[in-house]
Each structure stands twice: as C-alpha cells, then as structure tokens.
Image (spheres, rainbow, N blue to C red):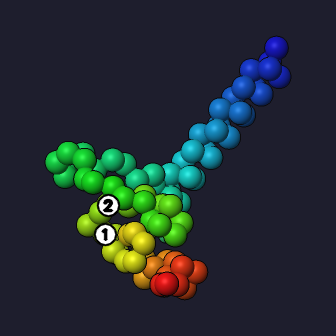
Amino acid sequence: MLKFVLLIVVVLVLLWLLRGKRRSVAPPPGPARESGGSRPVVACAQCGVHLPRDEALPGRGGVFCGEAHRAEYERSHPAA
Ligand SMILES: [Zn+2]
C-alpha cells in the first residue's frame, strides 16, 4: 500500500516537472483576446500554416507566411 502511494506521488511529481519544463521552454501562444476580437486569419499557400492576414505576404497564387515560401511556391508554380 505504501509503495502504491509512493508510486502515485512519483508520477504526480514527474507530471508536474514535465509541465513546468514545457511551460518554461515554449510558452503556448494564448489567444490574443485583449487586442479586440478575432483578427482575420489566412493560410499560407505553400505550407498551409495559419497566420494573421496583416502578417501574410501576398503573392502569385495566394498569400504566404514568408518570403521563402513565396519564392518556393512561385518556383514550383511557374507562370504560364
Ligand atoms: Zn508557409
């Protein structure tokens, strides 16, 4: 019985340590509620990642998360 309780305590401590470590390494990006409502979000045409429209780069064939993906996309989709 004592071993069982000890095991539970060890597991709880491990979970707590893992959670604390993860939080300190990469803080989860919380929803920006204080900026007033939801910002329009678009998907990068190259990798599909979602990002705010005002941060997206417009290009031929859609919008992109960065200059590299715009160049990549335009390289793989040459204009006719
Ligand atoms: Zn991208």
In the displayed structure, 10 sits above or below 21; it is: above
- 39 relative to 42 in the view: left or right: left
- Residue drawn at (74%, 20%) of the image: 5
Instruction: Rate crowding at label 2 as few (under 14), some (14 to 19) or many (20 or more) other CA atoms within 10 Å.
Output: few
One can see residue 40 in this view:
yes
Seen from the viewer's position, the closer of residues 75 and 35 is: 75
Instruction: Tell me the number on the disc at residue 52.
Output: 2
Seen from the viewer's position, the closer of residues 70 and 12 is: 70
- Residue drawn at (32%, 60%) of the image: 52
> Where does the image place residue 78, in percent across and percent down from the top left?
52, 84
Instruction: Tell me the number on the disc at residue 47.
Output: none
Q: Which residue is mark 1?
A: 55
User: Residue 2, located in which quarter of the rendered image?
Assistant: top right
> Where does the image place residue 37, in percent across and percent down from the top left?
20, 45
Marks 2,1: beta carbons within 8 A: yes
- Residue drawn at (45%, 52%) of the image: 28
Seen from the viewer's position, the closer of residues 36 and 45 is: 45
> Where does the image place residue 80, in percent across and percent down from the top left?
49, 84
- 19 relative to 50 in the view: left or right: right
- 3 relative to 41 in the view: left or right: right
> Where does the image place residue 55, in percent across and percent down from the top left?
31, 69
Instruction: Rate crowding at label 1 as few (under 14), some (14 to 19) or many (20 or more) other CA atoms within 10 Å.
Output: few
Report the Cα–Cα distance between label 2 and label 1. Answer: 5 Å
- Residue type at tag 1: Glu
Give SS at disc 1: helix
- Residue type at tag 2: Pro
